[in-house]
Image (cartoon, rainbow, N blue to C red):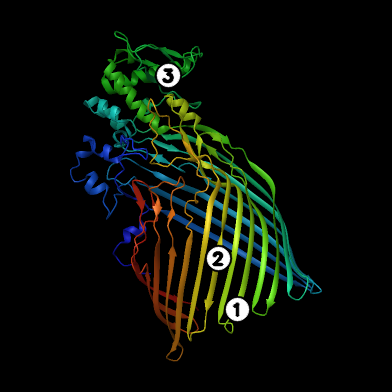
Amino acid sequence: MILSPSDTAAITSALPFFTPTPTTFSDGQKNPLSTDASTRLARSWFTQQGSYSYLSNYLSQTGVDVNNQQPLYTYTNGASTQLNWNLGNYALTSITGYRGYHFNARNDEGTPFNISLQGGGKVDEYKQLSQEFRLNSQIDGVVDYVVGLYLFKNGVDYSHGGWVSGWGSDAGAWFASNAQYAALDADGNGRYLLMNSLNGLNKSQPQSIRNHSEAIFANADWHLSEPLTLTTGLRFTQEGRRNQGSSYIADNGFAAELDPSVVNGVVLGGFDSYFNSSTTKSVSVLNGNVVPAGTPGATVVGPNAAGSSPYALTTDTTNAALLAQANAQANASALKYFNVSTWSGLSDAQKQQLYYAQAIRKGQIGVLWGNIQAQGFNKIQPTYVISPSYKINSNETAYVSYQHGEKAGISQVINGESALAQPEKNNSYELGLKSRLFDRTLLLNADVFLNNISNYQQAVLVYDSYTSTLKSDGTSYYVSATGNVPKVQVKGLEIDGAYSGIPHTLVRFSGAYNDAIFKSFPNSGQPVEYDTVATSTYTPNPYRDVSGQNLPGAAKYTFNVGAEYRYPVFNAGEFHSSFNTSYTSRYNSDVALSSYAWVHAHSVTDFAIGLGRSDQKFDASIVVKNLFDDRTPQALTWNSYTPAVYRWYGVMFVGKL
């Protein structure tokens, strides 16, 4: 296929386009923009590159910077075999399948600076194997049935190099807070620390996931009378989910000496410094974290009073080897960056610079953990259906159905802790009519449906005990993970049909009204526009009740209409032309239902025209996707959006032997 050269960047780039971050939160309070790109790019570190600016380049609507973008490597392979045996009144089928997959992506933060390196994900190996046996038969025209056995297992490995985070020489200046940047950019020693703090650091999170399913099933159509058929089905599936992984530093880069001594029990062999900002109170600190007074091994850092240093080394004093290593690394840092032989010989200003550089590094290292086996999921889960249908006449059939289904729980590790997502359960009801009208030229189907889902699985906000303990600043920190929503309800109406009453023409159409709501979700995470900065009169609440609101990504109205015209030409040729228009009403693209994330109603039309052989052995077509160049974003946040796939066109050739 040949693409037009215009707008191809919008098709191939997965990066969002950025917009100015709002200057106020939803409660009217001022947004300090302390971590916003506008603040970071205004620092002298980045303004030295005069050809690049926040307004002209970062907020550009015509392109993105991908200086560290690397190729996407992916491949897949597979095979399947189906064997059928006719055993008199029985038909036996065996289906065996295999699929393998590899994926390697490296992303960029969208600037020309050396900030993100090797960021992205890597699936070193994915394999799945399945085997199904089915036996079909009938009993004297009273019942048609199928029974079977289904076996499935898969494994995915994100091994060494998988899910990597990497940083470059500009990362320290990017991730520093305003106070940290001001102190480190004050002189050459500080700028050396700023550059080295994250340069070359590489973090990896290998993971091994193993799933298996074993199921027995049966389905039967009971012909109770000429017009009445009862469909029943039952399936029992043994679901097993296992997940284990670790998080470690794969490469220390240029500043191994700035590592902390211990992170979440993982020994790194560095040192820990602490700053006590209080002028009246002392604090007990162990490995850089505030701990209760009297904790064995803790260091008491005195108040920031005149004549005393507010900075101290705080490595476990009861571990002689760790303490010796920490002191050695602190002294090595003093020598490397200030040409002073010991930590104690540094001035408070120099200690502050080391403390800030290490804080930047610790903030990006985050939590580490050794190999952890997450809580697994093992359970027999039932699925069943009962659906009577009544043949009103030769052209109309009415039916009603009830189905119960369950989705397996999810075994996962979140910041070094097991976090099992509970299984999802769905009870579904449907009433429908299938019909052929106008001398069978119009196929028209319609149904109304109701789904009640409990423990709906989606991204939720969970308490991050590690980060909360690490920062010890009175603020509770949270992290996104797959969890459960207590109750979700989906109800609506669907129609679909096709009309063939016009010569050489087939018209297809479908539509749906879909009311998908959180029936009960009192603990949804707050959206980005919520003020999370605590004041003396205001304490942030990380959660809000969104019960009654629509699910993210769930448009209430969708409609699709298309037509195809085919006309014989020449001896064995066929001219054809077609279009398809899809309409989607507005929906919210953010899992936290941000007021900035509404994607407005839009439609997209595709068109094709071509000529080929009537036996389909050869065909050539001109294809236009998004004919009217609708540019409605695919997703939005309050300071970025994922662009639409703009109009493109090409020539497509199809042939077969």
Residue 150 % position (x, y) = 68, 57
Q: Which residue is mark 1?
A: 436
Tell me if 610 is positioned left or right of 392 in this view: left
Residue 621 % position (x, y) = 39, 77
Write the residue at 60% across / 78% down: 436
| Quarter of the figure with residue 184 | top left
Residue furthest left in the image: 50
Q: Which residue is mark 2?
A: 494
Mark linked to residue 325: 3
> Which mark sits nearer the N-terminus, 1 or 3?
3
Q: Amino acid at mark 2?
A: Glu
Q: Using the rendered image of the protein, determine whether residue 15 is visible from the camera's viewpoint.
A: no
Q: Is residue 120 above or below residue 613?
A: above
| Distance from Cα at disc 2 to Cα at disc 1 | 17 Å
| Distance from Cα at disc 3 to Cα at disc 2 | 68 Å
Residue furthest right in the image: 140
Circle 1: element type: strand
- Answer whether labels 1 and 3 touch (C-beta < 8 Å): no
> Which mark sits nearer the N-terminus, 2 or 1?
1
Write the residue at 45% across / 91% down: 571
> Which mark sits nearer the N-terminus, 3 or 2?
3
| Distance from Cα at disc 1 to Cα at disc 3 | 82 Å
